[in-house]
Image (cartoon, rainbow, N blue to C red):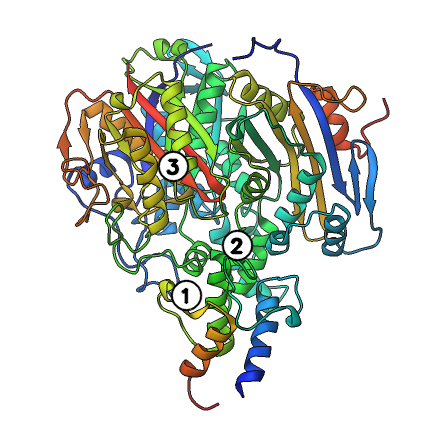
Amino acid sequence: MSAAVYIAGLGAISAIGNNVQENISALKESRAGLGPIRYLQTRYADIFPAGEVKASNEELAAICGWTGTNSRTAMLGYLAAKEALQDAGLVQHGTTWMAGEENCKVGLISATSVGGMDLTEDFFPDFLANPHAGKLRMVSQHECGAITEKMALALGISEFITTISTACSSSANAIMMGARMIRNGMLDVVVAGGTDALSRFTLNGFNTLMILDSQLCQPFDKGRRGLNLGEGAGFVVLVSSRVAAALGKELKIVVSGYCNANDAHHQTASSPEGIGSFTAMKGAMKMAALQPSDIDYINLHGTGTQNNDSSESTAIQRIFGDAYPKMSSTKSFTGHTLAACGGIEAVYSAVSLQEQCLFPGLRIEVPVIEKPGVMVQTFEKAEGIRHVLSNSFGFGGNCSSLIFSLV
Amino acid sequence: MRAALVKNELYINAVCRVTGNRAWKNGQLFYEQPGAAADEFLVGLYRALNLNYPKWYKMDRLSRLGVAAAEMVWENYPDCRPFEKAIVLANSHSSLDTDTRFVSQMQEIPSPAVFVYTLPNIVSGEISIRHGLKGEQAFFVTEQPDPEFLHSYTRSLFAAGKTRVCLMGWIDIFGEQFNATLYRISAESNDSVLSMEFTIENLYQYFYHEQGAVS
Amino acid sequence: MNREQLVEELKEQIIEQLNLQVKPEDIVAGDPLFNEGLGLDSIDALELIVLMQQKYQIKLANAEDGPKVFQSIDTMADFILANQPAAN
């Protein structure tokens, strides 16, 4: 049962761009998207930098072509998923999806932690003051699944829809599940990834955990102070080999390995030895039948918190010893996009392989991993890279690693 | 490595159902407290189980329900490594019960201990910490329990060869309404009386009937 | 208020804020709160920071100062008496 799972399309929207092209340009030019909060109304606007998508809800709705009240999470998700579907070249005739001449069964596996909370938290103050105040349509999209259903409706996907909500590993898990369903012949095509919008709920919450950086974050730097929150969406279109052939394009990137494990240590902190991360990375490599020396680059989870970067680097050291692959955290550009990070970073990893290059991690002064040349700090051409490992570790001890490879 | 198992040989070795102020274990009524508020019932269940786990009191209501349910079905598997123990859960309200509590606190100073639980998969984490489950975990948010989907998803974990025991089910709470149905699944049939085959029909029985439907 | 009253008040507040299943009489003011003693964890530490702010209007800017301040009820009481905003 080892059917290949190809990546046929990519879509992303984040603090550094409203589509994949814009994101990649920013990564190549070391232009981060972090700064004072300008779109979300919050008392923390000038206290904690964040990575907001540079568009208001009205502007996003206009791009989506949607009227009425819309959750920012749903709009971001829709835009990224739509871009990925268009990139893949799948076409819908009536209700049937086609890849070239072939029919295909298409599913949507989306991930989110915020859901429609961006609207609900605006509803609450009015409602708490007066039970007859507030517009009910603001809460009808609260539930995570409602966001996915709205996206599915707009995208024209109806055969399989589900929502995964496992914190920061959510969209990596969505991609993993999509790959599994294709390998088992349950679906031909899966639009997999995640979306999260910045909200006061998350800002306040992360602040009480005291893991926010009031300056621009510095993942994998010894002096790091915490994370910057971000928002966005990232989706990949996964297809079976039959669909890959039918699309008539030369698809070169496959999901070659994945693994999910639990740290079983604490609700929000990782174990010091990084046991969950260690297991997830090793498991993914085992599935892909790769040795540590085969990994050319790691897109780190690298949030910038004391705890994550310490556990993640410990786990990496246990696996790779002194023979580290190159690595960087693109959260230094986008901030931590929570449930969307696995999806967005999958897109970046795929482009890395496609264009044979490596994106940097910004603002590293004293790297956690001291060996020279390991932490990628400026954009690099990288001819010959074949395997990229992407980590996403979430609250609840949920650790996931994905490996993308060139065939 | 053990010889390959015949694909269909998976068993439900234990099941519990907690709803409507009653807790059922393997089809038998284990504890009830009619008329009590949900919080009171959960504390009563905790005591009836002799859980003896002070951290339980710091958990949110979803995790309290989940950990109590897990206590009713879990059994130690000394032969299995931690990474071979998996947990697959689903619900419809996600962490909404705790989310609303957090939002009301946000008006003043929000509580970190509450924020930590504003994600549905933290209950998987708490169960994993208590019983040393370090394998695969998944949490799905769907409107109703979907026995067909959960059945095939769980099967695929075993089929991949990495999972040897799995806690699977539905853990949901919102306000005074709560509903937990949890199964322990493995390839060994521990108990000739209690164990039953891991089929969609057998799952359906417990999702929609407390004692398991009349059979 | 005097120190003794503060210590008693702190015991009750901690029990309530952290959902502890002990009675005030069971807590010894000089005993360690973390690791042994009451076995509090890192989230409890954050909750104590919230307690300081909410009940005593003292803001702990650095989480790293936590371990020293929250070592025991006694150290917490000392800290409050030393740092509480005037007019009490």
Near-viewer residue (A107 or B186): B186
Q: Nearer the viewer, mark 2 or mark 3?
A: 3
Which residue corresponds to mark 1? C66
Q: Badges 2 and 3: C-beta atoms under 8 Å apart?
A: no
User: Residue at 64% across / 51% down in the picture?
Assistant: B61
Chain containing mark 2: A
User: Is disc 3 placed on a helix, strand or loop?
Assistant: strand
Q: Secondary structure at mark 1?
A: helix
- Residue for badge 2: A120
Element carrying mark 2: helix
Label 3 marks a residue whose chain is: A
Q: Earlier in the sequence, mark 2 or mark 3?
A: 2
Locate the C terminus of chain A by quadrant. Answer: top left
Using residue A404 as the reference point, say whether residue A322 is left or right of it: left
Q: Residue furthest bottom?
A: C87
Q: Amino acid at mark 2?
A: Thr
Q: Are marks 2 and 3 on the same chain?
A: yes
Any mark on residue A392, and which?
Answer: 3
